[in-house]
Amino acid sequence: MANRNPAVNQRRLEEAIGCKHFQECSGCVVDQNVAAVSVVQSAKFYFSSTSVRRKRVDILDRGLPFATEEKDDGFYKVVVPSKVQAWRTQAKLAVAPKSSTWSKDGCQFGLFRQGTHTVLEIPDCTVHHPSINRAVHALVEATEKLGIAAYQENTRDYGLRYVQFQVERVTGKICLTLIWNAETLKQTQPALSRLIKELEAKQPELWHSFWCHCNDSTGNNIFSRNPRRWHRISGPEFIREPIPATDQGWLYFSPLTFRQGNLDGFDIIAEDVARAIPGGSKVCELYAGVGLLGLTALSYHANEENGSAPLPWIRCSDENPSNSRCFYRAVDSLPLHVSGRGVGQMQDDSDEKFLTLAELAAMVESGKTPPISQDSKREEPSYLVASAGQALKAGQALGAQVLIVDPPRKGLESEVLDELCKPFNPNQPYVERSTFLTMFDDKVNWVNDVETLIYVSCGFDALARDCERLLSSPAGWVLQSATGYVLFPGSDHVETLAIFKRR
Ligand SMILES: C[S@@+](CC[C@H](N)C(=O)[O-])C[C@H]1O[C@@H](n2cnc3c(N)ncnc32)[C@H](O)[C@@H]1O
């Protein structure tokens, strides 16, 4: 996995971030040796522990003893997938009044100091993409010039609470979301419109789009999931990012969809996920966001230069309804040989759509094979809006040899984990859709055909918990590899790619 250039990785492991806000700012816990953080140490020990070694492919294949002393045996590889500086392409900053005496002299933008609600300004943050720092400077100037007041937590007065910056990497432009203490857009006026006008006038080339999110709640949540709280004020609806590991196609994001904080780094993870999928596999992806991992895999395997075979189908799902439009836009942007559109395709309700019964009977009589073959055709990439547990029970993973999961920090939903821990049922017929099932739903193993489980984790504790259950279950999972990516250099965070095989 990854580490395609060990010299570059080594240099990044030793490089300093060199930020002048370090120590005062709560954003980073180290300024150099970015892998020397406690979560990476814990992960190294965890994957070297006896309980994991017992189910590790390298140990099983070589017949090695699994009992071990408390030490890192080198199985867990650590990769720094992007530069250690300027990697952050998405940031949320808190807003506070500039002075404590007069609320209308503008705003300051930064992170809360550890354990407080006092904002520390970080105008020269070295992990921010330079466009974010430019945007912060522009906001400081504009709010000061116009006398825009920041939200006052104790009195619940005034407007601006948080700001979110999303950089479109190819243009360097910013999609700016202003989170305003208001119930409706009308209540943000005229301050919001004046602020946007000023920003646009001062730096017209910096902005991709402006959004307002109305949040008048008392809690600490920055965003509500209610789509009616979102308002696009100007600019295009979607940010475009190239599909990783290929020159073909685009991914589309809006502020209503999940987007990784370090896209350069996540590109490497997406490519590693694609490489871990055997060519020609049918793939189901849960917790798919806008389809970043699945569509990368689809593109990667459609590229002859990678010496692979195209994926007959990918089925993606996520609970956020805003994702599906982004997903289908991305599919539209792919060349036909990648998306599989029009290439011997199987439509949604099976091929029976194309033949009448009489035609089918005539074909069989004349000795021809009817075109109802569940495993030889390509199916258009599809997207289901559903929770991961619901998606499995709708049959999304029936017939899939590979399952990709990239859950939020809290890990897999218990329904998903329960399903993955069921033993393989050799008597369950192979079908690719629940309509073809001849068993009662409660008897079905919804992941019976999955041979490779690709687990991308942003929460190490939850991964360790899920891994423990998978490896001790009767489902036959063994661990092929575990790679830790220092995706947010400076922070005590690790993104892990764990690959399980069924034996
Ligand atoms: C860490 S993100 C990964 C998204 C995608 N792989 C990416 O990199 O852009 C997790 C995703 O899980 C979704 N999610 C959270 N809880 C979920 C659930 N219970 N069922 C399905 N999706 C869920 C979120 O909407 C989010 O898109």
Image (cartoon, rainbow, N blue to C red):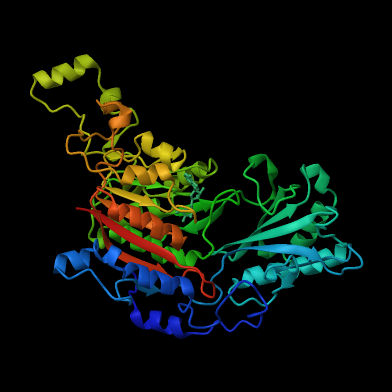
In this picture, is 440 found above or below 198?
above
Query: Farthest residue in the right direction?
Result: 102
How many labels were placed on the picture? 0
Residue 475, horizontal then vertical, whole percent: 25, 47
Query: Farthest residue in the top direction?
Result: 358
Image-based side of 96 in relation to 240, left or right:
right
Residue 46, horizontal then vertical, whole percent: 36, 68
The residue that appears at 28% across and 54% down in the rendered structure is: 472
Find residue 143 and report its image quarter. Answer: bottom right
Find residue 427 and report its image quarter. Answer: top left
Of residues 36 and 181, the one nearer the viewer is 36
Residue 481, horizontal then vertical, whole percent: 29, 65
| Residue 435 in sight from this viewpoint | yes
Image-based side of 305 in relation to 406, left or right:
left
Of residues 378 and 344, the one nearer the viewer is 378
Query: Farthest residue in the left direction?
Result: 367
Of residues 222 and 306, the one nearer the viewer is 222
The residue that appears at 12% across and 21% down in the rendered structure is: 364
Image-based side of 69 in relation to 90, left or right:
left
In this picture, is 414 found above or below 154?
above
| Residue 247 in sight from this viewpoint | no
The residue that appears at 24% across and 49% down in the rendered structure is: 451
Residue 163, horizontal then vertical, whole percent: 70, 59
Of residues 110 and 90, the one nearer the viewer is 110
State the quadrant of the N terminus.
Answer: bottom left
In this picture, is 93 found above or below 352?
below
The residue that appears at 25% across and 17% down in the rendered structure is: 356
